[in-house]
Image (cartoon, rainbow, N blue to C red):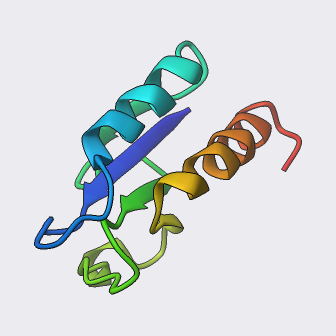
């Protein structure tokens, strides 16, 4: 499954966003392939926010399913959900 990836601007992150995305990519290796949020082949986009302000502009992503994460603790749930989607269970 192709998954678009978009980061917020990173003005005041509460956690290491890149580290969590790297962990997600490792745990979903062979199941999910991360691509740019601009890649039209990606039906879903993971939008990684660094804090609860959620300032990333998602207007250009209309029509695609967005999975938003705002905190490090939300990545475990995102991984589970993406795995289920990729396996057709969601």
Residue 1 placement: quadrant? top right
Res. 41 visible in picture: no
Res. 42 visible in picture: yes
Describe residue 86's horizontal placement relative to residue 60 as left or right: right
What is the x, y in percent for residue 56?
Answer: 25, 77
Q: What residue is at 29 percent from the left and 84 percent from the top? A: 59
Q: Is residue 61 above or below residue 19?
A: below
Q: Nearer the viewer, residue 43 or 16?
A: 16
Q: What residue is at 31 percent from the left and 64 percent from the top? A: 14
Describe residue 9's horizontal placement relative to residue 51 as left or right: left
Which residue lies most toward the front here? 14
Q: What residue is at 28 percent from the left and 57 percent from the top? A: 6
Q: Is residue 17 above or below residue 22?
A: below
What is the x, y in percent for residue 37?
Answer: 28, 54
Q: Is residue 58 above or below residue 50?
A: below
Q: Tally the marks.
A: 0
What is the x, y in percent for residue 62?
Answer: 40, 79
């Amino acid at each position: 499954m192709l998954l678009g990836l978009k980061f917020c601007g990173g003005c005041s992150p509460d956690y290491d966003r890149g580290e969590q995305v790297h962990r997600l990519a490792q745990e979903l290796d062979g199941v999910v392939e991360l691509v740019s949020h601009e890649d039209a082949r990606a039906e879903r986009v993971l939008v990684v926010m660094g804090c609860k302000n959620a300032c990333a502009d998602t207007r250009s992503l209309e029509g695609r399913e967005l999975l938003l994460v705002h905190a490090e603790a939300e990545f475990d749930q995102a991984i589970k959900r993406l795995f289920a989607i990729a396996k057709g269970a969601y």
